[in-house]
Every structure is written in structure tokens, then in C-alpha cells.
Amino acid sequence: MSTKMSPSLSPRFFSEKEVAKHCTKDSCWVLLGTRVYDVTAFLRMHPGGEALILRRSGKDISLEIEGPPHRHSENARRWMEQYYIGELDRDSTDEDTEETLRQRKKIPESITEEEEETTSAINKCSKVDEETDLVDWRKPLAWQVGHLGEKYDTWVHQPVDRPIRLFGNDFFEANTKTSWYMVPIVWMPLVIYLSWYCYSLLAQETTRLVISSDYSILVHKYSFPFIFALGMFLWSFIEYCIHRFVFHMRPPAHNYYLITLHFLLHGQHHKSPFDGSRLVFPPSLAAVVIGLFYLTLQQLLVEGLGTSLFVGGLCGYVVYDMIHYYLHYGSPSKGSYLYGLKAYHVKHHFEHQRAGFGITTTFWDHPFKTVIPEQTF
């Protein structure tokens, strides 16, 4: 039975001994004052790693919430509330059972199967009040958000942990969701084939980079790894620009269509950042953008050079999508490169939505002055 509560139900009460029992990966509870939270589902998502929470399981984490070393944002505190399951009864003794506490507090002994199913479906995801929220969560959101106007920006940056239905049509809805493994399955064979093709083409020693009408440079086959790496590096810049200037554009409050477009492209990800089915790009949508980049490079550069740059960039895109998924669902080792990236990216979602646009690297945030500032106390 799910312990998460519906707002309409009276709070459950737990003894300190009972809270302390929940200290494993399978069931992890923490306290915030006298409020009890079941954070089991959040362990993998925690940017500091699940070990940090497990070490504090069954204990009051009020000091950790306030910091140092990290003061949690208002969005993080709001996020915490969706895991609320009841209150701590400090007056209870170790011999008190939950049944005794129910009787003393006059709490219903159980809820019906129907109530449990509703509670599990709604509250394991979010504390959204479906009666007062700015949108109707029982209906597809794609055509609603455009009407939010000036309230859209604030609303979309208040994240929730619940699934989002974008379209009423099942076909369109299914095409907005992609399993992470589909990205390497679709694109890595193309990366491997084009890498072999480019190396073979350059090996013919007919590819020359024209500097002027009188001077050109032979592009040798041994230069392919360096061109490939340059393509990956250029992708990191494109990744930064797309994330900052396209995904984080500020649609005019009066423009219904731009607000809707922004929500479909990236706003839905900020509203529900742990929706595992929408953390990578659908191959059908990505193919359009990838095709445009390919055609552009073919027009600007000779085939061997342009295709070599393209395949490096394509590999960079695959790495980007995989890292992005891992930053949301992975548990990197403390002190590792990905550990720092995960903490950085979570800050982007919960505190600094106008900074921290780098995903695979923070390199480009530095020259463009969008680095997320370090917290000081």
C-alpha cells in the first residue's frame, strides 16, 4: 500500500522508532522537523548521490536543507513536499504501534483500494492541486499553456515530479516519448559507417582544402581523428547555443503560439525534469535538425572535410543525449566529472534557469558569462 497521502486525507502519525526503521534503498524516510517524508523514489535523482540521503535516513535534515554546504532553493523545498507522508509523534513510546497512534489521533485505520489507487497515481508524482493550478492536469497541456500569458514563465519553472500529457491523440503523444537507448541504436551505426567512409575517402588523397585559387592543402587520412574531435568540440558550442537561445528563449506573454512552441521544445522538460521518456530527442525530430547541419556543411566544405566534421558533431550529439539522461537518472561517484555536472545541471533546473546552459561541459558558460555562481554563506 502506498504511504503517500492525498491532501484530502488526515495526516498519518509515526513513532520515532518506526521512522528509524526506514533506512535502506528500498524504503528511505527522512524528517523535516516533525514532518515525515518517504524519499525512496528520489534517491537516484538526488544530485549529491543516494548515499548522502541514506546516511541521514530516519533523521531530521533541517540543517542540511538550510546549508552549508548547499542551501536548497525554494523549488527544491517545494519538490520535497510531494514525498510528505505524515507527522512524527514525539509523545509516543517505543511500544506504541501505528494502530495505537491511529486510535489516539482518531485516524481512519485504512483507505479503500480506490482511494489508494488515486493517491498513488497522483501523489507519487506531485502536490499539484488540480482544482487551483493554472492548467487542468486531467487534460493535455499542449494547447493550454499558451493561455497562461505572463504567468507562464513562473509556472513552467516550478518543477513537479509527475508525467505530462501533451496531446490527446495517442499517436502524437507516443511520438513525443523516446527511450534513452533509441538514440545510440539509431545514430551510432551511422557514426560508425560515416567514420569508415570518411577515412576511406581521405585515404584516396584527393581531398584538398582550398585556401586561395593558387594554394590548397591536402587533407590527409591521418588528420581524420583530429577533424572528428573538432566536430565534437563544435557540437558542444552548438549545444550551448541551442540550449540558451532556442530552448530558453523568453516567448512574449501575449504570443500564444510561441509559448506553446517553447513548452513543446523545452518547457515541458523544466516542468517535469524527471520524466524519463522525454529526456532525449525523438529520432524523427532530431533527423530534421541533423539533416540541416549535414546539408550546410556539404555546401560550405569539400565532401571529405565536411562529412568528417559532421560525423564528429553527430557523435557529440549522441554523447550529449546520453550524458543528459545520466545527469537526471545516474548516480555518479563523488568527485567525478559527471558528479560535478549533475550538481551543476540540477542547479540549472531548480535555481538558475537563466544560467548553466552547458550540458556535456561548462566550458562555454565561462566566455559567455552564464556560469552558475558558487554559493556563499
Image (cartoon, rainbow, N blue to C red):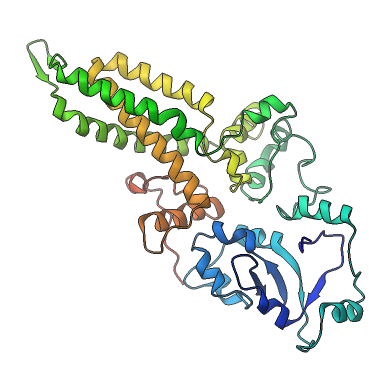
Farthest residue, direction left: 214
Q: Which residue is drawn at 42% across and 19% down?
A: 291
Quarter of the view holding residue 167? top right
192 or 235: which is nearer to us?
Answer: 192
Relative horizontal placement of residue 111, taking residue 39 as reference (left or right): right
- Please say if 31 is above or below 171: below
Q: Which residue lies furthest to the top in this view?
A: 213
Q: In which quarter of the image is the N terminus?
A: bottom right
Along the viewing direction, whichever of 142 and 48 lies nearer the viewer: 48
**Which residue lies at the image location 90% right of the left edge and 70% below the top edge?**
109
Vertical arrangement, residue 101 with respect to residue 371, above or below: below
Q: Residue 252, image x and y in percent?
A: 61, 33
Q: Which residue is drawn at 63% across and 63% down?
A: 40
Q: Give x and y (percent) for residue 9.
A: 87, 63
364 on left or right of 346: left
Residue 352 in sight from this viewpoint = no
Location of residue 211 by image quarter: top left
